[in-house]
Image: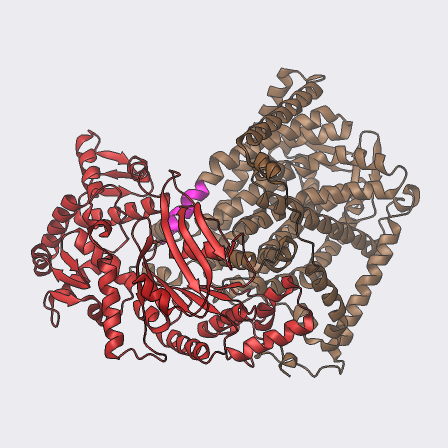
Chain colours: A red, B brown
Amino acid sequence: MATAVAARAKGKPLLEIKGLSQTYAKAAADDLLVLEGVDLTVRDGEIVGLLGRSGVGKSSLLRIIAGLTRPKSGEVRWRGRPLAGPSEGIAMVFQSFALFPWLTVLENVELGLEPLGVNSAERRSRSLQAIDLIGLDGFENAYPKELSGGMRQRVGFARGLVMQPELLLMDEPFSALDVLTAETLRTDLIELWSEGKLPLRSLLLVSHSIEEAVLMCDRILLIAGNPGKVAAEIPIDLPHPRNRNDEAFRELVDKVYGRMTNPSGPADKPKAQSAGMDLVLSEVSTNTLAGFLETLAAEPFKGKADLPEIADELTMEIDELFPIAETLALLKLAEVDRGDIRITAPGRRFVESDVDARKKIFAEQLLATVPIVALIRRVLDERPSHRAPYRRFSEELEDFMSEEFAEETLASVVSWGRYAELFSYDEQAQAFSLEDPE
Amino acid sequence: MPAHRPASFGKLTLLPVAPSVWDAVVFALVLGVLALVAFGGRETLQPLAVGAGPISLDPAVLPHYALRTTLRMLAAMAASLVFTFAFGALAAKSRRAEMVLIPMLDVLQSVPVLGFLSFTVTGFMALFPGQVLGVELAAIFAIFTSQAWNMAYSFYHSTKTLPRDLKDLSDSLRLGAWRRFWTLEAPYAAPGLVWNAMISMSGAWFFVVASEAISVGPTTVSLPGVGSYVALAIAQHDLKAVGWAVLTMLAVILLYDQLMFRPLVAWAEKFRLDVSDAEPPRSWALDLFQRADFLRGLFRPVADILSSVASVRMGKPIAAPPALTRAWRSPWTERAWYVVLIAIAVIAAWRAIAFIGGAVGLAEVLHVFVLGFYTLARVAVLIAIASLIWVPAGVWIGLRPRWAERLQPVTQFLAAFPSNLLFPAVVVLIVRFDLTPDIWLSPLMILGAQWYLLFNVIAGTRAFPHDLLEAAASMRVKGWGWWRRVILPGIMPSYVTGAITASGGAWNAAIVAEVANWGDTKLTAHGLGAYIAEHTKDGDLRRVVLGVAVMAVYVVLVNRLFWEPLFMRAARMLRAD
């Protein structure tokens, strides 16, 4: 497959990454990796998508390419030379727009040309051109706060384009926008790209939306695992403009869903099955879990659903959907396989029960499948005081994961444990206990 | 051509070029200010005998005195700003510097400014022998020490909490340190800095008045200013003159607020990152300036010069040789740094002990701590009494938006008014009715500081979520339960903020409040403030240092052990998510 992609590739490689690894910025142990053994190439003339769930290291990878952080190890070559810091020819578009609120649209766009030593007349004319191209004509003197989200991101694009970069990095540029605005912006961008009007050679798009990646990219790289690596490479051959309702388009989306639930063979299965203390739990509310199970059990799914379909029904992106599906799989309330989700026997019992019985089923599944919950309960049972401090468990987790992940995991544990009435937690005293508030 | 579009769509814009009435008004204002600065500034270069000539009690000289006082204030503010940028940037950029500078700031903030006056006057007079400038600088330095610390801290805090995306963007555009400072760091810090400068300035009026008539041992210098005027009025039993001074001060503070700070606060709104729903602060003076198009044209060259300063192309920083970088980052450098720090601390402590110990025994040190305890007791009781009065009053006002809108600026104004101008009135009463100074001098300490309490309680109540109030009302929570369960936890963080400022102010005021004069009558209360004041008068620097150090210890301890834990607890309780 790799050779097929190479044969299709349009131009010479611009960016080459080999054997890259990166550690967490704030980890208790030095050797906790967020990325490991990442290889990737971006060639002249292509749009490459980095697709993966949050926390998998996509943004870390992008920051390394932008020269904002250095990798722990591995090689990053830009135009054939090792990359050292922010480089000429690479520009970036931010998820949060990153506009200076005290500068006008024009001043925001001009800003990056100044350090390059472009004189002020040329700065002005180039910026006006970029603003014109991206459809912001007439807003030159507006301040960002006077613009809608979509218009703000257009400023972000204009600022990237005015640099006339060879590679434009885009960090989830549409995810802070509403559905309609995002779609307009995507189509505008792809149109300009297909017509060859964008002053750039290639695009690297970080995304957590499968449809967005299939809509825009020539090639999708799936980033998955813990630590993250390139788990699969999926070429997209469809001609632009692409139609979301196209048969071929739907098939590709299904294929990517399948790849994301079972990236490649058993070794890379989501850690849910490995069931150890290294399990990172995402904060999913028990209400959401119950609601999802109910939808799954009811018409039209009747216990078994295609993930893209149920995502569509609930209008969820994979960033919301996957944590829910994975948590259900972990608790053995549902099973996930090749892009499908199926309710299990305990899951069905859960849906059919009343509030108290639901709590009991949830508690049983929690104790059986989440080791940290079992540990907390055991420690509380054994201690005569039936109390244990938060640090006792967070330190245990930090041997296996970064501080942030340990905090997120324990937050989920607290909320699930409270719902299941397995233990209570005193936020002021930062302690777990078995006491029931009267 | 789009470049000539009006800056904002909603606002009325006048035709360019044709001068408007506003232009004339603003132009006159600017010219007037320039002339005043030139006039006031020239006088400071006069020899000591002329410039610091006898103070007159004639009300006609008061405008002149007020000008001098105000210029001192401005000079100190400029110095504070320069200090803030240097200090804040250094602390935010270098971890090793941060380790020392931030705790230092904390202590400096707690040191009573007035206690230092005696050292600085001698120092600065030695620098400029025989010139008014030396004494002027000493007074300016005293004001500087009362306002620089929290401004520096505000800037440091802003620089540490820069939004990550804007930081990344600046790196990715390779803006460089200088341009980045002007494009990102300074604008981002502006709203906080302006607010802190305003609070500092409020506090500083107190010190400017106190520092104008300085006597250290045998030397007594009176700088022309409102403070000296009042000092003379007290010495001559002239209650009417005190009244004139109070009126002048009211006018000065009002002008300062309207012409300088309100415009600044309104202007700094532009740099706020989060757009809140609250009505942004407005200022008629700023509107005036922004509407005067002709004037804006006049100022454009100035703005252009400023912006070209910001975009000066600094050469690429010279890359340090790798060996040096490695050495700089090695753990050995880290250890060496610690050793140097500890060595300096030990030497400093040893010198200080040797200096004080030469004249003062252990018994006196203990005695000073006991005196400190008296002052502590006074501050505690006063804060408690002020809280009992101002918390209910503040909540009452805060719940009524119309009142709050009108009274909030008034409280701010009252906080800025130098309460030491009012001391004579109280002293006259104490003398007339033969009251115990130990008790009746105490209220003077809280006179100026109490407004911070009221101000913050009003602000906290206004910020309290309206839906929670309605929920409480619909559940018919009333009386004591309402105070305990609803409003008090809600305003707690604001209250604590106000109380910290108020108690800090009260400690400082102790130095002028525990000893009071009216003509030849002298009233003294037992306390640390009186101890420092007496020995300043004698010129006994060792005992002044001892007193100042003990006071700093008390303030730091009370903040650390009482206010800060209380604040953390209150803030944590209030967090909704």
Asked whether residue B570 is drawn in magenta, I would say yes
Q: Find the magenta span and give its range.
A: B566-577
Whether the magenta-drawn stretch holds residue B321 is answered as: no
- Compared with A375, B302 (above or below) is below
Viewer-proximal residue among A5 and A342? A5
Q: Position of residue A343 (x, y in %)?
A: 11, 60
Residue shown at the point (80%, 34%) measured from the top left: B123
Q: Tell me which corner region of the image, top left, top right, bottom left or bottom right, holds residue B551.
A: top right
Position in image of residue B546 (x %, y %): 66, 25
* Left or right: where B217 falls relative to B79: right
**Of B522 and B183, the residue lying toward us:** B183
Locate residue A27, reporting x and y percent.
Answer: 39, 42
Residue B374 appears anywhere in the view: no
Question: Residue B299 occupies which quadrant of the picture?
Answer: bottom right
Residue at 25 percent across and 60 percent down: it is A260
B507 relative position to A369: left or right: right
In the image, A289 versus A188, the foreground residue is A188
The location of residue A421, given as percent across then percent down, is 17, 46
Q: Quadrant of the N terminus of chain B?
A: bottom right
Front position in the image: A25 or B440: A25
Q: Is B308 located above or below residue B122 in the figure?
A: below
**Quarter of the view holding residue B568:** top left
Q: Magenta-highlighted stretch: main secondary structure? A: helix
